[in-house]
Image (cartoon, rainbow, N blue to C red):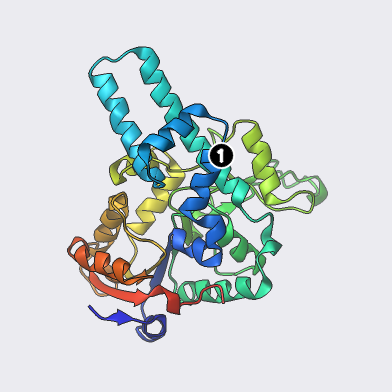
Amino acid sequence: MKLETFQEVQKAIEGKGRRFHLMVGNGFSMAYDPNIFSYNALYDFVNSLDDPILKKLLGIANTKNFELIMRQLEIFSAFLTAFGADRELQDTVSTARLNLKTSLIDAVKALHPEHVFTVPEEASKACARFLQLFLGTGGKIFTSNYDLLLYWVLMRHSISNAGDGFGRELLNPDENVPSEEQEWSDLRWGKNRDGQNIYYLHGALPLFDSGVEIEKEEYDTQSYLLEKIGARMRRSNYPIFVTAGDGREKLVQIMHNRYLTFCYEALTNIEGSLVTFGFNFGDYDQHIVDAINAAAKHGRKARSKLWSIYIGVYSLSDQERIESIQGRFKCKLHIFDAKTASIWG
């Protein structure tokens, strides 16, 4: 299969007259700074915590793939339940799963750049131009990342045609109330979802489920966004994160949250073409492949379904792997060299 350049992909985006959507994975963040967003950095942080159970678990697992560890814990927990194992042992395994999840969230926050202006201006502008390529075609942007990079770029450059579905609601909607006395809610998801084109498929650091509303933390002049997120976490209010093992278990988590369900269903209904960057379609991403295939079969008229996917790869081994699984995709497959995209300048 031909390895295209991103410049060839861009010509297709600009010349085909159809919607082009974007989906980014961890490679999007690693392209900005691999020392912060690599799996090695997360592993080293979690391993440094004063938690003997986690240390023992990481030592036994002998892998830095947290999805695999989660999956192994879930299988082990199911075996313990099926065979009526000692309740104390079952609780220990459940605690280990919970601690690993919360430690991963803590790691992402702790390793994260402090604020939006930590990202150099030119890098942020380059990324904004990259995102605008897709939004300019009427396309949507999907991310499986938990970090703030995408959110920061969209906010910093006030990209007018980008919407994540969040907004404030007037709490005292009485026409006799003077504007200076109007009370507004925190950023809530829901009423603005019809114009949504930014989707956090697996949740993200600024997104929280209050039990009633899906809320988003926002930067203000009093405190950095990470400080506000940290304050919530200190109250044991953790962000929306999908951290299950395999694709089926991730989908179960997604379907138990109305925001995540909406985002996933949006992916199943895209039309035109999809470009992926930094998403490796690993063994635990079958739910994403299923969503893409649902979009590929959606409708029969021209422009009413997903016709093609362009997958970015970083190495020959990445390319060979995608070629080995190309039969899993129900639309035309292209492969391009992700290094030629230079999304951060």
**Horizontal and vertical percent position of residue 153:** 60, 65
Residue 319: x percent and y percent? 29, 70
Residue at 67% x, 60% y is 116
Whole-percent x, y for residue 12 in the image: 36, 83
Tell me where residue 5 sits by quadrant.
bottom left
The image shows residue 330, relative to residue 112, as above or below, that is below
Closer-to-camera residue (300/198): 198
Point out the image quarter for the N terminus: bottom left
Position above or below: 69 against 205: above
Could you say which is closer to the camera, residue 168 or residue 291?
291
Residue corresponding to mark 1: 48
Q: Residue at x 30, y 28 (%)?
A: 76
User: Residue 61 is drawn in which quadrant?
Assistant: top left
Which residue is pictured at 55% across the width and 53% down the height?
Answer: 147
Name the kind of residue labelled 1 in the image: Ser
Which quadrant would the C terminus be assigned to in this image?
A: bottom right
Q: Can residue 9 be spotted in the picture?
A: yes
Q: Extreme left residue here? A: 327
Residue 6 screen position, x and y as percent: 40, 80
Residue 116 horizontal side relative to residue 339, left or right: right
Q: Is residue 291 left or right of residue 228?
A: left
